[in-house]
Amino acid sequence: MSAVLQLQQVSLQLGGRSVLDQVSWQLPAGRVLGVVGPNGAGKSTLLRVLYGERVADSGQVLLHQRDLASYSRTELARQMAVVVQSPSPVFSLTTEQLVILGLVPHKRWFDPTTSQDRQQLQLALEKTGLLELRHTKLEALSGGELQRAYIARALVQNARILLLDEPTNHLDVHYQHQILQLIRQLQLTVVCCLHDLNLAASYCDDILLLDQGKVQAFGAVKEVLTAERLSKVFQQPCTMLSHPDLPQAVIHFHASPRQETP
Ligand SMILES: Nc1ncnc2c1ncn2[C@@H]1O[C@H](COP(=O)(O)OP(=O)(O)OP(=O)(O)O)[C@@H](O)[C@H]1O
């Protein structure tokens, strides 16, 4: 199957340091890719390169086999929706006003809001549990509610590719699962940075493990997330625990064994 997104030997330096180093991978349509790795591994930078906010020093980013740089802003916004890490409130907008901005790439100036637009808005608010907060100003939302409002905007944008930087940041356990379940059900091509490896293992098809800008592993969840590899990359002892009710092992990091004092 041909790739929707493809990176070929992408490298990027920032502040004189290599932040992405010869990164290559490709993702077919409908796959959910989890990008994981320690702090500073280059996860957010990789996402920025994918939505064109940063341009790689070398290598190529292809969207539907075409150079990403050849897409206009509007073309890109029709193809991909982005939710950045810890989005900030746009002051004086209500939840509903933010979410409806997701329609912008599909409309011309002065196009009226149609009943179909309203339906899409209603559905996105429903799915993200924001119906009751639709008229609330963004600055009055909690961190998790604001995160969900940006996810709702991405849903309204109706793009076939979804890029998410830590979408479960600020969310309570219930909404962490709700949002990731929803993202899976949409059957989109998704690239999602996640710190929680158990969430990544539960909801992603493939995993890209980055460390210091380099690809440590890329592939199916079970192949990438092994105790040995995770212990090494995160420099913390890791054990895979089997659970009677779960198809996959639970990833458990623990304290290093204490040194006995003589
Ligand atoms: N504008 C910049 N100038 C210089 N260095 C930068 C810049 N932006 C990011 N970096 C560096 O690039 C590296 C990768 O940053 P990035 O935010 O992509 O990491 P991350 O994997 O998303 O980290 P985290 O898990 O902490 O969010 C870090 O060492 C960071 O300090």
Image: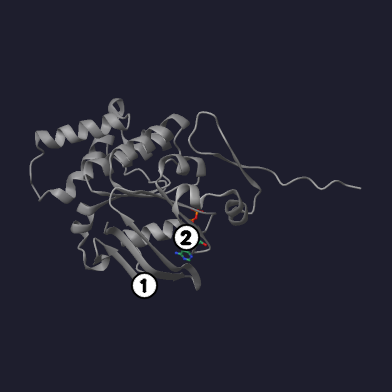
- The answer to whether residue 170 shows anywhere in this view is yes
Q: In which quarter of the view is residue 90 placed?
A: top left
Residue count near mark 2 (Cα–Cα under 10 Å), binned few <14, some 14–19, many ≥20: many
x, y percentage for residue 48? Answer: 37, 59
- Report whether 258 appears left or right of 39: right
Q: Residue at x 41, y 36 (%)?
A: 144
- Tag 2 residue: 42
x, y percentage for residue 235? Answer: 64, 54
x, y percentage for residue 159? Answer: 23, 48
Q: In which quarter of the view is residue 67 placed?
A: bottom left
- Tag 1 residue: 59
Q: Residue at x 46, y 48 (%)?
A: 221
Q: Which part of the image, by quadrant, shows the N terminus?
A: bottom left
Numbered disc 2: secondary structure? loop
- Report whether 249 appears left or right of 29: right
Q: Residue at x 54, y 39 (%)?
A: 249
- Report whether 242 appears left or right of 213: right
